[in-house]
Image (cartoon, rainbow, N blue to C red):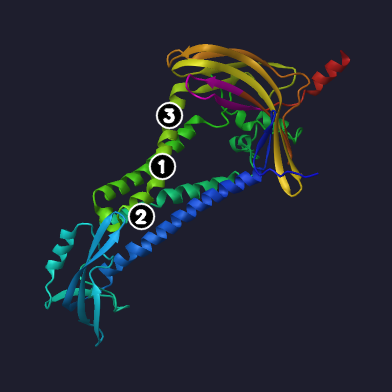
């Protein structure tokens, strides 16, 4: 029988299977490509423009030259013509006379013919003028020199690629083979005096709840942390948007003001089209995160005790802020199973929702900053429910999921991790005797 090999995640009913290592590898490769493009662009800008101009202004030696001829070179480009002034000069260096065509170190050209003719009229044929020669390579000679401030701004162009690529690689290596719950609540081996730490030796394969009980609640005992805080998404989107579009704005300013237009032509505008599309996407993503955070608001979940025990009841408090109308506001208790296994030479991870119950659901709800939605619930873990579990290849995860659906927006979920311990020995003995 032929075995079909899937190189991407797929869903079978309520089960999700895929290749996590392939996703991580693709993510790492993407950030590595961004870093490579940024470093290559930075190296090219530095070697082609910055370093030659720096040497011409700092290391070239002044000498006298004789202008023997001059000419105006016309280059045909897709958007028209470009004009380059050049001078045929003779100068002595190291007891040898050199003859060459030159003007500046960058090979100046312009789309304005009158501007090129003005440069030619500055130097008369048969006259001597001051110039600068490269002592290391006498064949390099310039008649004018100076720093172009717009060249140094070009160094900002590769910065977004390097920042995103390097940051993504660091994040990928730090979170390799770690689930969101593990990234949220890292184990603290040195923590002392907590309930989770006291129970940990008795249950070595149950995740500790140190980071789930270190924040006291306002109504109840503990405030549950989010698996992923929306504030982090807003901050990350804001930094990426400002960094990328600031550099893009500088490039467009230099281009349309004529500085880059004279040096590169309209092909440069076509080259920055992908950068513009990325900037527009970052603008959309930034506005979306602000609208989601400001419109849906914050979600606060508090619980009366933690960790949870099967068969026992707990009080739960949910507060949802925001502004406007909510089509759906629901609170669910979910248990997921994650299994990592080998299929041939591939390593796959299967995620299956093994238990789900709705604790609260309400439609057509209006909230405002002054009148948030506050819900007090009773949470009860089933008596025969599987407790939380964590091993090398298997994991049982419990979480509280708050579902918010606003008109015109996709369904938005916020998850709060929970830890369920086995029923105590006393409870088990009481049930057996009964």
Q: CA distance from mark 2 to mark 3?
A: 30 Å
Q: Residue furthest bottom?
A: 95
**404 within the magenta span:** yes
Instruction: Give x and y (percent) for residue 216.
Output: 56, 24
Residue that appears at 44% across and 58% down:
40
Q: In the rendered view, would you say 397 is above or below 360?
A: below
Q: Confirm or deny contact between disc 1 and disc 3 (CB under 8 A).
A: no
Residue that numbered label 2 is attached to: 155
Relative side of 68 to 303, left or right = left
Q: Secondary structure at mark 2?
A: helix
Q: In the rendered view, would you say 262 is above or below 69?
A: above
Magenta span covers which residues? Answer: 401-418
Q: Secondary structure at mark 3?
A: helix
Quadrant for the N terminus, please. Answer: top right
Q: Secondary structure at mark 1?
A: helix
Is residue 217 at least partly visible in the picture?
no
**67 within the magenta span:** no
Q: Nearer the viewer, residue 429 or 137?
A: 137
Q: Nearer the viewer, residue 134 or 16?
A: 16
* Neighbours of disc 1 within 10 Å: few (<14), some (14-19), many (20+): few
Question: In terms of sequence position, does the residue under pointer 2 or pointer 1 come before the other?
Answer: 2
Quadrant for the C terminus, please. Answer: top right
Q: CA distance from mark 1 to mark 3?
A: 20 Å
Q: Report which quarter residue 304 is drawn in.
A: top right
Instruction: Give x and y (percent) for residue 217.
Output: 55, 21
- The tag on residue 277 is 1
Residue that numbered label 3 is attached to: 290
Q: CA distance from mark 2 to mark 1?
A: 20 Å
Q: Nearer the viewer, residue 312 or 95?
A: 95
């Amino acid at each position: 029988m032929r075995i079909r090999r899937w190189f991407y995640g797929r869903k079978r009913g309520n089960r999700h299977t895929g290749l996590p290592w392939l996703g991580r590898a693709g993510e790492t490769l993407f950030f590595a490509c961004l870093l490579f493009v940024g470093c290559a662009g930075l190296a090219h800008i530095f070697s082609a423009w910055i370093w030659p101009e720096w040497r011409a202004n700092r290391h070239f030696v002044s000498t006298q030259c004789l202008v023997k001829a001059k000419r105006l070179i016309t280059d045909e480009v897709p958007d028209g013509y470009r004009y380059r002034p050049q001078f045929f000069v003779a100068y002595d260096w190291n007891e040898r006379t050199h003859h060459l065509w030159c003007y500046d170190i960058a090979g100046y050209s312009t789309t304005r013919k009158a501007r090129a003719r003005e440069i030619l009229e500055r130097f008369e044929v048969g006259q001597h003028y001051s110039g600068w020669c490269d002592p290391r390579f006498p064949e390099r000679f310039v008649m004018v020199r100076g720093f172009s401030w717009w060249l140094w701004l070009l160094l900002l162009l590769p910065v977004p690629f390097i920042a995103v690529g390097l940051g993504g690689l660091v994040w990928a290596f730090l979170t390799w083979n770690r689930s969101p719950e593990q990234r949220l609540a890292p184990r603290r081996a040195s923590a002392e005096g907590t309930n989770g730490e006291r129970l940990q030796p008795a249950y070595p394969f149950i995740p500790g709840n140190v980071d789930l009980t270190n924040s006291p609640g306002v109504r109840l005992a503990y405030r549950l942390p989010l698996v992923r805080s929306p504030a982090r998404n807003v901050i990350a989107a804001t930094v990426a948007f400002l960094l990328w579009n600031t550099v893009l704005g500088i490039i467009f300013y230099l281009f349309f003001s004529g500085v880059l237009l004279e040096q590169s032509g309209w092909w440069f505008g076509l080259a920055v089209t992908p950068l513009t599309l990325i900037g527009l996407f970052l603008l959309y993503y930034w506005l979306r995160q602000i609208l989601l955070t400001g419109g849906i608001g914050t979600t606060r979940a508090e619980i009366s005790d933690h960790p949870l025990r099967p068969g026992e009841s707990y009080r739960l408090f949910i507060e949802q802020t925001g502004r406007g109308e909510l089509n759906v506001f629901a609170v669910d208790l979910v248990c997921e199973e994650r299994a990592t296994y080998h299929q041939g030479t591939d390593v796959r991870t299967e995620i299956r929702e093994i238990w789900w119950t709705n604790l609260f659901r309400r439609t057509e709800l209006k909230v405002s900053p002054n009148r948030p939605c506050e819900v007090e619930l009773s949470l009860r873990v089933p008596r025969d429910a599987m407790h939380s579990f964590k091993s090398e290849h298997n994991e049982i995860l419990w979480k509280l999921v708050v579902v918010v659906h606003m008109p015109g927006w996709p369904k938005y979920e916020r998850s709060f991790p929970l830890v369920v311990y086995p029923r105590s020995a006393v409870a088990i003995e009481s049930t057996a005797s009964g």
